[in-house]
């Protein structure tokens, strides 16, 4: 039961082989048994989850259920959920119980899904290893010595360890795709603006995008059908016709033009990861796809541009944590300014402080033109590289991450090394494009490798089709860690 994917569980609920309450109890039991070791969840609330499951069972009995009704969903702790503690992995929000629901949470509620708990994450989604969480690191279910990736590492680990069948994540520079790759699961970051950011705690607003994580592309399509859609409360939410993201899953990939950017196979890529990715591309060729060489020359500038733009936006977004209205407040202080300073000094961790300082610096008078404006120009050039490439191909493929999961503590004191682990994912956010990662094999250390698929704007249905066809012909996505 725990090994089944969303699609299978949905069929069992509809066929009354199991109730949502039984299913929810199964997963809650698994969380109770494994969470002390894996640390994938920050908050679990059995009472709320079981109440939602009872409600779902009523809907199923009334014949008014959809594909997600009664399905347990792990929610990244960046999504505000009414009545749930919502921490964003930070001491700053460790006592914050949200009075309202994020748009994404509302959508899952309307679909009748069960919130099975809030997943661990890097503090304010800043990180690639989940080690910056105030609630402690998450362990990779494939190898407890390894990180699960970040920042949606709790969600990825929860799925790999079968503590939840599906989960939500957010991706500002790779935080859905990289942990999906490192934990051997599937995840998609939609085109910027497809999923509402309302109630999704802000890190870098022009880059942040929520998306689904699960065991298969088919499951992601069912989740995205729930998550996507216009919301007037997010000024960058796109008002587009509603799409069925499952509609193209069964189309053939014969004739598909796959762009291979030479810059994604250069220095810094682990040869074992490269081999797995090349094998996956060969598999597509066997299915009739054609390979086209494309060039993304400005990708090498994506990390420096991102580490100007993202901290700039973060320094502004995080100014709201002042200890006054909600969140953590220092216990002792002399006056108002001292209260702000002490609350922020004690409430934020080192990585968050580093970003706030960098962001404040690059936005300051005298440096704005030299750093921030330059980074915005690079951002435009990166987007243009992709536009030119998509004139020649339908999707772009390459590795999601330059290495398999690294060891806990391995990159902890070297932020630049940590930042480099997002070298293949960040450009996609800067351009606002959709990107996904699917399991494609393993390295000799037994740790999973992800294949990244990048599509043109609004080509999610096509990308899910491309991923689904691979998953119909391979079984990497069915492999699970022995935990
Ligand atoms: N690892 C990147 C960072 O630390 C991206 C994180 C994310 O996508 N939320 O900013």
Image: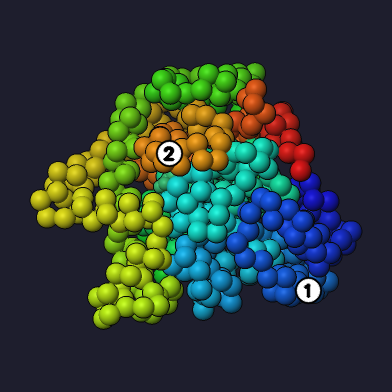
Left or right for 55, reference 298: right
Instruction: Return the residue nearer the eye: 340 or 253.
Output: 340
Nearest the viewer among 480 and 468 is 480
Horizontally, residue 335 falls left or right of residue 468, namely left
Instruction: Locate the C terminus and report the quarter of the image it occupies.
Output: top right
| SS for dot 1 | helix
Picture residue at 39% right of the left edge, 61% below the top: 348
Which numbered dot is residue 418?
A: 2
- Taking the spot 24% from the left edge, 42% from the top edge, the residue there is 375
Q: Quadrant of residue 267?
A: top left
- Tally of marks: 2
Q: Which mark is residue 54?
A: 1
Task: Residue 272: give x, y in percent of width and height.
Answer: 57, 20
Camera-nearest residue between 74 and 187:
74
Mark number for residue 383? none
Crowding at dot 2, Cα within 10 Å, few <14 / some 14-19 / many 20+, comes out as: some
Q: Give the class, few, some or many, for how many residues have Cα within 10 Å of label 1's Cα (few <14, many ≥20).
A: some
Residue visible at 72% across and 64% down in the picture:
69
Figure colour scheme: rainbow
Q: Is residue 26 above or below residue 184?
A: below
The x, y position of residue 405, in whole percent, is 57, 35
Whole-number angstrom distance, CA of label 2 to CA of label 1: 43 Å
């Amino acid at each position: 039961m725990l090994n089944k994917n969303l699609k299978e569980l949905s069929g069992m609920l509809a066929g009354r082989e199991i109730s949502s309450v039984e299913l929810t109890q199964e997963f809650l039991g698994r969380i109770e048994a494994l969470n002390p070791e894996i640390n994938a969840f920050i908050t679990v609330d059995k009472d709320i989850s079981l109440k939602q499951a009872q409600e779902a069972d009523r809907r199923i009995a009334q014949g008014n259920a959809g594909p997600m009704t009664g399905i347990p969903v792990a929610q990244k702790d960046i999504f505000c959920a009414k009545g749930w503690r919502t921490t964003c992995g930070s001491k700053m929000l460790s006592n914050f119980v949200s009075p309202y629901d994020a748009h994404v949470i509302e959508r899952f509620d309307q679909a009748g899904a069960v919130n099975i708990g809030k997943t661990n994450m890097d503090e304010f989604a800043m990180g690639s290893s989940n080690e910056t969480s105030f609630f402690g690191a998450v362990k990779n279910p494939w190898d407890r010595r390894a990180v699960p990736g970040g920042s949606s590492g709790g969600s990825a680990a929860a799925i790999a360890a079968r503590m939840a069948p599906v989960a939500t994540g957010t991706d500002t520079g790779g935080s859905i795709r990289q942990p999906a790759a490192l934990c051997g699961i599937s995840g998609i970051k939609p085109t910027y603006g497809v999923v509402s950011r309302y109630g999704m705690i802000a890190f870098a607003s022009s880059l942040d995008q929520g998306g689904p994580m699960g065991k298969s592309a088919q499951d992601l399509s069912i989740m995205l059908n729930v998550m996507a859609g216009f919301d007037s409360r997010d000024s960058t939410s796109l008002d587009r016709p509603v799409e069925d993201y499952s509609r193209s899953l069964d189309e053939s990939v014969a004739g598909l033009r796959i762009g291979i950017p030479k810059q994604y196979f250069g220095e810094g890529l682990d040869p074992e990861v490269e081999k797995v990715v090349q094998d996956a591309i060969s598999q597509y060729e066997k299915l009739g796809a054609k390979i086209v060489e494309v060039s993304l020359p400005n990708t090498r500038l994506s990390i420096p541009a991102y580490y100007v733009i993202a901290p700039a936006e973060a320094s502004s977004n995080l100014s709201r944590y002042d200890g006054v209205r909600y969140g953590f407040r220092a216990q002792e202080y002399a006056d108002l300014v001292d209260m702000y300073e002490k609350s922020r000094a004690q409430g934020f961790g080192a990585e968050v402080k580093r970003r706030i300082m960098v962001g404040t610096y690059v936005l300051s008078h005298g440096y704005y033109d030299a750093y921030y404006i330059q980074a915005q120009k690079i951002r435009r050039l990166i987007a243009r590289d992709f536009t030119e490439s998509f004139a020649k191909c339908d999707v772009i493929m390459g590795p999601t991450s330059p290495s398999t999961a690294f060891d806990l503590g391995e990159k902890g004191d070297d932020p630049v090394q940590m930042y480099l682990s997002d070298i293949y994912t960040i450009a996609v956010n800067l351009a606002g494009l959709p990107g996904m990662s699917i399991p494609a094999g393993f390295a000799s250390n037994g740790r999973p490798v992800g294949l990244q698929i990048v599509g043109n704007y609004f080509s999610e249905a096509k990308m899910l089709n491309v991923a689904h066809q691979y998953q119909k012909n391979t079984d990497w996505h069915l492999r699970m860690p022995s935990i």
